[in-house]
Amino acid sequence: MKIATLESLHADAGQRDFDFLKITTDDGRVGWSEYNESFGGPGVSAVIDGLAPHLIGKDPRAYEAHVALLYAVRRQAAGGIAQQAIGAVENALLDLKARALGIPVGTEVNEAAVRAHPPKKR
């Protein structure tokens, strides 16, 4: 399973648009995330397009390594457009991985949190 495409999709909702990121793998699996360019973040789609070459051909299940690489590539201040774009990519990769494993995305997130911060023994 390798990342084949990243596609930004936009839906006109009247006063604002809804923005979605669709990541598709070479075997047809899809991961989704939502982001927002309507409130202070125009340009997120362009940043996602610029980040895409760093992800195409990679295994989406290694999302933590991909996110670390994207932060290193962009080196922006926290909270900016680049972070919004990377957050959209991370969420879509998490969704894709969870779907590939056949589990809810919350299960993957919770397991990652436990690995990062294991409970202390008393």
Image (cartoon, rainbow, N blue to C red):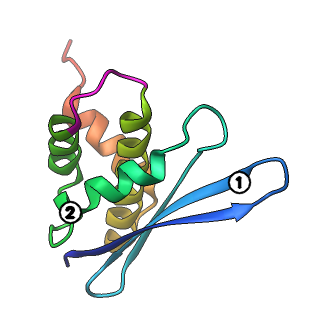
Magenta span? 74-79
Of residues 2 and 9, the one drawn nearer to the viewer in this rendering: 9
- Sequence-wise, which precedes: disc 2 or disc 1? 1
Dominant SS type (magenta)? loop
How far across and down, in percent of the image, does residue 34 sit? 55, 53
Q: CA distance from mark 2 to mark 1?
A: 26 Å
Q: Residue furthest top?
A: 122
Judge from the rendering whether residue 74 lies leftward or rightward of residue 36; answer left or right.
left
Element at badge 1? strand
Q: Quadrant of the N terminus?
A: bottom left
Label count reads 2
Q: Which residue does the image show at 42% across and 28% down from the upper left?
A: 80
Q: Which residue does the image show at 23% across and 26% down from the upper left?
A: 117
Q: Residue furthest bottom?
A: 27
How far across and down, in percent of the image, does residue 103 sit? 41, 64
Judge from the rendering whether residue 60 lies leftward or rightward of residue 81; answer left or right.
left
Q: Quadrant of the C terminus?
A: top left
Residue type at the position of mark 2: Pro
Q: Which residue does the image show at 60% across and 56% down from the upper left?
A: 19
Question: What label sits on residue 17 in the rendered view?
Answer: 1
Q: Residue furthest right?
A: 14
How far across and down, in percent of the image, does residue 58 sit? 15, 67
Disc 2 target residue: 53
Residue type at the position of mark 1: Asp
